[in-house]
Amino acid sequence: MRSKNGLIEEMKKKRFQFLHKLYEMAEGTQRASFNMYEIGKKVGFDEELTKNIAACLMAEGLIESRAIGGGRVAITHQGTCEVEDALSYPDTPTTHFPSHNIIIGPVIKSQIQIDSPQAIQKGIIGDDKYKELKEVIQSLKESIDQLGLTPQEKSIFQTDIQTMEAQISSSKPNATIITGCVGSITRILEGASGSMLASGFIEALKALFS
């Protein structure tokens, strides 16, 4: 099974996705505020995950609440610096995020590297493959209880599936987010040692992104 550190890294990457989207929406200013659930929706996160991510980013001083209850948030100067450092030096970890080497943005056909020696590297997906991906996702949902995952792995697995479904149903699917979720799911499946079912899913996903 995957290590605790690996699961922590996955959550850090999701927090960076949220922060980066807020950075894009703010267009370089700390004055603008946005509904945090709308930000979460744009990157394919459900409300519970969005709430948890926002709370963590607030605790780290990367975003701040602009309404009672934290419904609206704004990026701070520290948060802006974190995003810009991460984008400028992708091979170097920032104070709060690991190095990621991942292209951020709505890129449909680009090479994307995911941090795992066994991960999918090319990350190329065309419109003709979205239907096939949906079929694989459905099979994953139906088989999740047979993969022998820990509760934490299962939670991340389900979140990644929900994120991909939201992106695929969008009028403008973000291939970077989809590829990141596929990489996350693949790493979890790699931890299902000796599982023929997991191996089959890994091969199916790699075939789609080769």
Image (cartoon, rainbow, N blue to C red):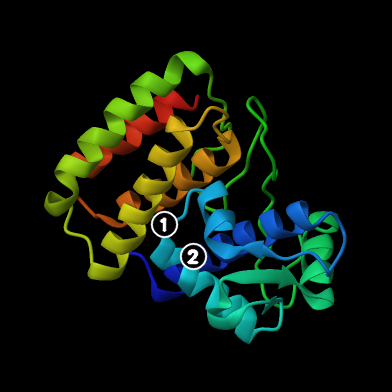
- Residue 54 versus residue 104 in the image, above or below: below
- Residue 28 versus residue 67 in the image, above or below: above
Residue 78 position in % (x across, y down) = 81, 77
Task: Verify CB contact (< 8 Å) between mark 1 and mark 2.
Answer: yes
Please indicate, yes or no, whether residue 120 appears anywhere in the rendered image: yes
Q: Which circle marks residue 50 in the picture? A: 2
Q: Which residue is mark 1?
A: 46
Dot 1: element: loop
- Residue 86 versus residue 77 in the image, above or below: above
Which residue shows up at 38% across the image and 32% down it? 205
Quadrant where the N terminus is found in the figure? bottom left
Residue 158 position in % (x across, y down) = 31, 53
Residue type pointed to by label 2: Thr
Residue 161 position in % (x across, y down) = 35, 46
Which residue shows up at 69% across the image and 51% down it? 101
Residue type pointed to by label 1: Asp
Residue 102 position in % (x across, y down) = 67, 47
Q: Residue furthest bottom?
A: 59
Badge 2: residue crowd in 10 Å (few <14, some 14–19, many ≥20): many
- In this view, the residue in front, 26 or 8, is 26
State how far apart marks 1 and 2 are (Cα). Answer: 6 Å
- In this view, the residue in front, 111 or 191, is 111
Which residue shows up at 84% across the image and 54% down it? 27
Which residue shows up at 49% across the image and 27% down it? 209
For this view, does 31 lie left or right of residue 156?
right
Please indicate, yes or no, whether residue 90 appears anywhere in the rendered image: no
